[in-house]
Amino acid sequence: AVSFIGNSLGGLIVRYAIGKLSAVGFFDSVRPMNLVTFASPHLGAWKPPDNLVQQLFNSIVPYTLSRTGGQLVYADNFIDDLP
């Protein structure tokens, strides 16, 4: 059995690694036990861009950090601007 623990961005990296391990059949022979993440931005850390630097961050990160980068800049969708 194997467990995974990640903090902050490490939680996203662990989640990504689990997907990769699953894709190659790792869990066919090893039983996954736990996934524990602390302070990981699973719903993203996107901020409405106020300046050019933030615009660049939001547009470049999904490409430079692969799937994890894309998840980092996810934005919640609100109905009538209410959470």
Image (tube, rainbow, N blue to C red):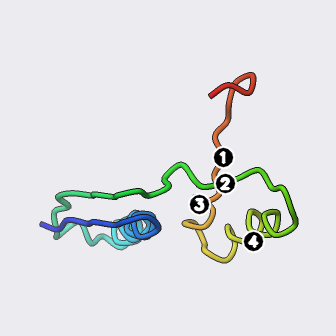
Give the image location of residue 26, x and y in percent.
27, 72
Q: Identify the residue at image location x=68%, y=70%.
A: 61
* Residue indicated by mark 4: 60
- Taking the image as shown, residue 22 lies to the left or right of residue 72, namely left
Q: Amino acid at mark 1?
A: Ala
Q: Earlier in the sequence, mark 1 or mark 4?
A: 4
Quadrant in which the N terminus is drawn: bottom left
Q: Earlier in the sequence, mark 3 or mark 4?
A: 4
Q: Identify the residue at image location x=60%, y=67%.
A: 69
Packing grade of label 2 (10 A; few <14, some 14-19, many >=20) is: some
**How far, Cα to Cα, is label 3 from label 4?**
11 Å
Discs 2, 1 touching: Cβ within 8 Å: yes
Discs 3, 4 touching: Cβ within 8 Å: no
Residue that extends furthest to the bottom in the rendered view of this protein: 64
Discs 2, 3 touching: Cβ within 8 Å: yes
**How far, Cα to Cα, is label 2 from label 3?**
7 Å
Q: Earlier in the sequence, mark 4 or mark 2?
A: 2
Q: Identify the residue at image location x=39%, y=64%.
A: 11
